Amino acid sequence: MIDSGATRWVTDLMSTLGAPGAGLAIALENIFPPLPSEVILPLAGFTASAGGMGLYAALVWTTIGSVVGALALYGIGAALGRDRMVALATKVPLVKVADIEKTEAWFERHGTKAVFFGRMIPVFRSLISIPAGVERMPLPVFLTLTTLGSALWNTAFVLAGFFLGERWEVVSEYVSAYSKVVLGAAALALLVLVGTRVFRMAGSRKAGDRTSGR
């Protein structure tokens, strides 16, 4: 279901600023995920089809907005740094330093793919910039991957809104369903991870009790 308040706000922003308004909305969407790109991008395409802005300008400015928003989150990750991240993460129940080291090793091997393809996964498209900053992925590499991934995602949705016209909301409905599947899968994976960790901790505790009882 589309938030009419968010739609109205984005529409007003585009009416006032044109294509740069669409870029600003997307930059903010990266930092504040509750602002949905699945509303902003097709709406920008519809606005372009109605003559409110140029199609090429919509594509360029929304991509610029994506990169600017991603850079802000990259900066947060870089400012946080590994030591602070480890200190914070180890305070989370069931999280060990070994888990963080495994994540770092995984990101070192697959970070480029994660940043590129992550730009096309709802919610994670914003968050993926933070570990990239923490791990200090070379900025030129990060910018290139973010620009390419964002350009593909944005172009698909802006063009969909452009060709669907007044039916642009259909895009949002499909992406909303896709987002729920992604979030559901992530939640299930988290539950499995937590359940496995709790089971192992309980097993280790029982083994320790039996050893001390001898």
Image: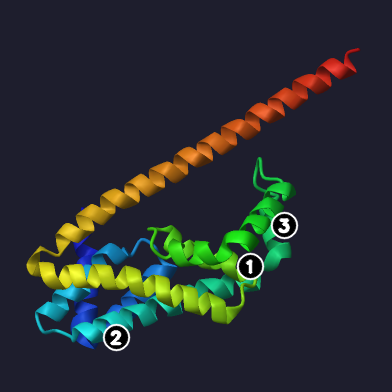
In the rendering, which numbered label is found on residue 134? 1
- Disc 2 marks which residue? 20
Looking at the picture, which amino acid does disc 3 mark? Ala
Q: Residue sitting at 49 percent across and 62 percent down?
A: 127
Q: In which quarter of the image is residue 124?
A: bottom left
- For residue 95, side relative to residue 43 (left or right): right
Element carrying mark 2: helix
The vertical placement of 126 against 206, above or below, is below
Looking at the picture, which amino acid does disc 2 mark? Pro
Q: Specify which label sits upstream in the sequence, 1 or 2.
A: 2
Q: Quadrant of residue 12?
A: bottom left
Scheme by which the image is coloured:
rainbow
Callout in the foreground (2, 3):
2
Element carrying mark 3: helix
- Disc 3 marks which residue? 87
Q: Do the residues labelled 1 and 2 touch (CB within 8 Å)?
A: no
Q: Residue sitting at 32 percent across and 75 percent down?
A: 25
Q: Can residue 128 be seen in this view?
A: no
Residue that sits furthest to the right in the current view: 214
Element carrying mark 1: helix
In the rendering, which numbered label is found on residue 33? none
Quarter of the image where the C terminus is located: top right
The vertical placement of 148 against 32, above or below, is below
Callout in the foreground (1, 3):
1
Q: Are marks 2 and 3 in contact (CB under 8 Å)?
A: no
